[in-house]
Amino acid sequence: MEGITFVLSGFVNPERGVLRSQMLEMGAEYQPDWNSKCTLLVCAFANTPKFKQVKADGGTVISKDWISECYNQKKLVDIEIYLLHAGKPWRRQCISHEPSEDIKPSTSYKSSKQEEKGSPAKKNAASSKIKSCFSPSKVKKWAIEDLKRTILWLDNQDEKPEPGEIKKIAAEGILTCLQDAIDALRQGQGIQQVADQWACIPKIIEELVQFDGNSTKEDLCKEAMVCKQIYELEFLNVEHDEFLDKKKAPSYGSKKAGTREKNVATDDTSYDSDATIEMTEEEIDQAYNTISSSL
């Protein structure tokens, strides 16, 4: 989908995040609101204020079903039957490889730094407070809590994902929300506007919002990036544990919460004790500090 710059209208998260992720994965470029660079509006309903704005501007409007078909078939499908309004060409023929204006962290950080002047001592104190409140053990706990809460929220919706996909969609939605917060901070914007777009707000976003305005956007952005990496690792660990559980022989006896069962059949040649890595709190903190210092 190179050459397509799209805007989403009328969708709420996590569906909004899924649609955006699918378009980005296929090579399209996302814009938060309609502007001269945009070529396509993906609209949930016709005749909305945004629909009328884009129509008046001569833009092309389509339904979300076109995205789903393109994503499922891994190719561009005929757009005609999905058109809500046919306007200007919906794909640029000459694809520019210049970076988009909304992802220039150096400019946004510079402007946010000018607004957040203060003594080095105060900045260091604020940075230390952020790190203490976002310790690895806390963030790991929030990741699991957010995953469970989002799965429950999705399961209670009228239109719910398939049982085999619900955990994956929940994880993708949480990570998309975190990435939205990171993008907002990079542009010198607040996180509250990101939180307002989500029906099921992750705990990590609620915690980050509390520091928005009391810390520099740069410090908060770095912390959000570290938290996103921890969330990604936790979600991978959950997926890995489920895979191992499926391979295990039937368990005998109870299994202590938070630990893997140690009794494994001696004739199970597929079991490899090196596959499991146990980390102490000190090792987790050291890994956290390594990631944080590299950003």
Image: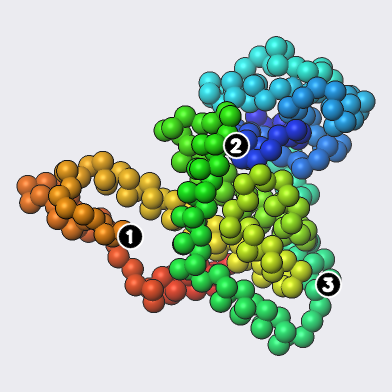
Task: Give the number of the mark in front: 2 or 1.
Answer: 1
According to the picture, the residue beneath numbered tag 1 turns out to be: 258
**Of the residues under marks 2 and 3, which one precedes in the sequence?**
2
Q: Position of residue 4 (x, y in %)?
A: 72, 31
Position of the C terminus by quadrant: bottom right
Under circle 1, the secondary element is: loop
According to the picture, the residue beneath numbered tag 2 turns out to be: 18
Q: Position of residue 105 (x, y in %)?
A: 72, 59
Residue 46 in sight here: yes
Residue at far right of view: 56
Name the amino acid type tagged 1: Gly
Q: Which mark is residue 99?
A: none
Looking at the picture, the colour scheme in use is rainbow
Left or right, 48 with respect to 18, comes to right
Residue at far bottom of view: 121
- Label 2, label 1: how far apart the Cα atoms are: 30 Å
The structure residue drawn at horizontal position 7% and vertical position 51%, both measured from the top left corner, is: 266
Q: Residues within 10 Å of mark 3 (few under 14, many from 20)?
A: few
According to the picture, the residue beneath numbered tag 3 turns out to be: 114
Under circle 3, the secondary element is: helix
- The residue closer to the viewer here, 94 or 41, is 41
Name the amino acid type tagged 3: Gln
The structure residue drawn at horizontal position 51% and vertical position 43%, both measured from the top left corner, is: 152
Task: Give the number of the mark in front: 1 or 3.
Answer: 1
